[in-house]
Image (cartoon, rainbow, N blue to C red):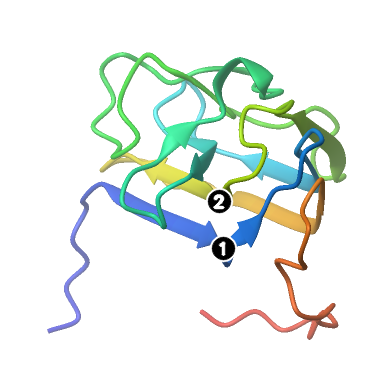
């Protein structure tokens, strides 16, 4: 009917399953984000070691810049560490590295980038690029895909 409905929203970018070797699992990426000020919206990096049945926040290993607002109705929940507000140097991309050590050694895992937005004010969101995984014994991403430089509304 074309009517816009304001409601909480969740978006995810999830990797294929990959196997972690004996050494540390390190995930690096470039990103920039601009969420609604005040921690009402935010982004998380999560990991699953059971095929995606459940997910854990990578937690203290994350370079999060703050916490979500305790009163948010965003699907990621309130009062938790996350990427919130705006990244330093916006609109430039910055580097992030997550060293998860050997906690996931010899396991099959998936990673995901997850945004939770509340039912109110909108903002540009989170862009993630150049994801690299070290410590995996296989290739989680089959190929480097060129940027199409096209935005689809």
**Which residue does the image show at 51% across and 26% down from the upper left?**
37
Badge 1: few (under 14), some or many (20 or more) residues near its Cα, within 10 Å? many
Q: Nearer the viewer, residue 17 or 9?
A: 17
Q: In this figure, which residue is indicated by the disc labeled 2?
A: 109
**In the figure, is residue 10 to the left or right of 130?**
left
| Quarter assignment of residue 138 | bottom right
Coordinates of residue 34 in the picture (x, y in percent):
62, 40
| Furthest-left residue in this view | 1
Secondary structure of the residue carrying tag 1 is loop
**In the figure, is residue 14 to the left or right of 119?**
right
**Which residue does the image show at 47% across and 45% down from the upper left?**
49
In this rendering, the count of numbered labels is 2
| Marks 2 and 1, the one that precedes in the sequence | 1
**Which residue does the image show at 19% across and 81% down from the upper left?**
2
Coordinates of residue 64 in the picture (x, y in percent):
64, 22
**Which residue does the image show at 29% across and 25% down from the upper left?**
72
Q: In this figure, which residue is indicated by the disc labeled 1?
A: 17
Quarter of the image that includes the N terminus? bottom left
Secondary structure of the residue carrying tag 2 is strand
Q: Is residue 60 above or below residue 99?
A: above
**In the figure, is residue 78 to the left or right of 16?**
left
Q: Nearer the viewer, residue 98 or 67?
A: 98
Coordinates of residue 23 in the picture (x, y in percent):
82, 36
Mark 2 → mark 1, Cα distance in angstroms: 5 Å
Badge 2: few (under 14), some or many (20 or more) residues near its Cα, within 10 Å? many
Q: Is residue 127 above or below residue 49?
A: below
Coordinates of residue 46 in the picture (x, y in percent):
51, 40
Q: Is residue 76 above or below residue 62?
A: below
Report if the CB atoms under discs 2 and 1 are less than 8 Å apart.
Answer: yes
Q: Nearer the viewer, residue 47 or 45?
A: 47
Numbered label attached to residue 87: none
């Amino acid at each position: 009917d074309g009517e816009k409905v304001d409601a909480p929203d969740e978006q995810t970018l999830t990797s294929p399953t990959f196997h972690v070797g004996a050494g540390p699992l390190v995930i690096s990426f470039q990103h920039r984000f601009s969420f609604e000020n005040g921690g009402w919206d935010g982004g998380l990096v999560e990991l699953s070691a059971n095929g995606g049945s459940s997910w854990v926040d990578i937690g203290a290993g994350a370079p999060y810049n703050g916490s979500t607002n305790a009163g948010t109705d965003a699907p990621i929940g309130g009062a938790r560490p996350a990427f919130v507000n705006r990244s330093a140097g916006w609109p430039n991309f910055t580097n992030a590295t997550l060293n998860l050590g050997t906690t996931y050694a010899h396991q099959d895992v998936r990673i995901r980038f997850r945004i939770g937005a509340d039912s109110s004010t909108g903002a540009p969101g989170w862009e993630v690029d150049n994801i690299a995984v070290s410590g995996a014994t296989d290739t989680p991403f089959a190929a480097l895909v060129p940027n199409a430089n096209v935005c689809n509304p």
